[in-house]
Amino acid sequence: MFDNPTSWLIAGGLALGVIFGLIVRQYRMCLVAAVSNATLVKDYRYMLAFAMAALVAITGTQLLEINAMVEVSKAGYRNGSLDLVGVILGGLVFGIGATLAGGDATRVLVLAGQGSKAGWTALFFFAIFAAVAQFGLLADIRVSSMTNTSISLAGGDAGIAEMFSVSKWIVLIVVDVLLIAFIAVKWKQHADFKLLLGGAMLGATVIAAWYTSGVLAFDDFNPKAPSAISVSGPMSRAGNMLVAGDTPTLSLAVSFVIGVIAISFVMAIITRQFQFTAIRTSSGMIALGGALMGIGGTVAYGCNVGQGFSGLSTLSLESIVAVIAMLVGIKLATRWLERG
């Protein structure tokens, strides 16, 4: 269909962004809501949806790797250094920021597309401070911390199977069994088939992203490491464009973000729900939340999409730790807001 591999990345990113945005909008999928509901009212319906998303994404991505269809091990999430300090600190900061901002990375994109002033406020500060952490004043501190605290891996791969010299099949089976067990245990009290289906579709977009970048857009003459969906990276480049005028190059991740916002705007217009809604909580709190999302997502090498969907699907130990830190950050901030 496309002779230029870049065309596959751009078109694929847009299509996946549209699909992902529709699912998030339709089912109101948000990691902050999932953790908050489970923490405050013991409602695990959204947690089950995200568990299903992880199950589908991990299984599909690992099968792509095991069958040598996509060189997942060359992705950034599986690099030869392990920065546990960065992903723990960054994950905690991102989780706290997302809670203060009122939604995770894709939820903020959807809200902005619908005209929410809170969504645009969070998105603006997300982009600006992601750029500050990636390219600006905080970049030297971030790089210095990474250099001094990262652990070089003997095997050159942060994947669980590679680090512990275990068969990929065994690791995949164990992880899948744990996720299925969690879903089964909570299913009787928190059954919601529609949300579970929504989670499965989100997981499928991750598999499609790896296939797009690793197969459809693969160039024998100019081979590049495969990549999947992400938000914090494109946000840092958007912030850098606003500050320094450096226009980001279109890629799968950048196109994905554009697709999410675009479909949210289009659907809001079609359903006559687009309106510039006022900020109902503290604008300062939302701005702070967006800023923490930008810093945390950059320090952790990804947000709940980059590390939480794409990174987790590679079964990278670094990504797993980052996701756990985000969940803890959301839970801590939720408890703090409840007391306040």
Image (cartoon, rainbow, N blue to C red):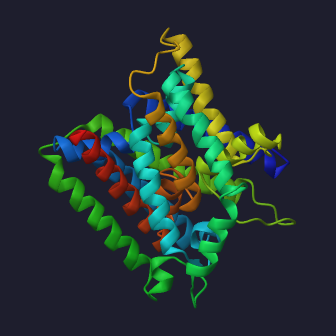
| Residue at the spot 49% in from the left edge and 41% down from the top edge | 288
| Residue at the spot 32% in from the left edge and 45% down from the top edge | 49
Q: Residue 106 placed where, x, y %?
A: 50, 39
User: Can the viewer see residue 142 in this picture?
Assistant: yes
Question: In the rendered view, would you say 277 is above or below 218?
Answer: above
| Residue at the spot 31% in from the left edge and 43% down from the top edge | 34
Camera-nearest residue between 269 and 199: 269
Camera-nearest residue between 227 and 295: 295
Q: Residue 306 placed where, x, y %?
A: 55, 54
Question: In the rendered view, would you say 96 is above or below 89?
Answer: above
| Residue at the spot 57% in from the left edge and 48% down from the top edge | 294
Q: Residue furthest top?
A: 272
Quarter of the image with the N terminus is: top right
Q: Residue 117 placed where, x, y %?
A: 52, 22
State the count of labels: 0
User: Can the viewer see residue 70 in this picture?
Assistant: no
Camera-nearest residue between 225 and 116: 116
Q: Residue 48 placed where, x, y %?
A: 28, 48
Quarter of the image with the C terminus is: top left
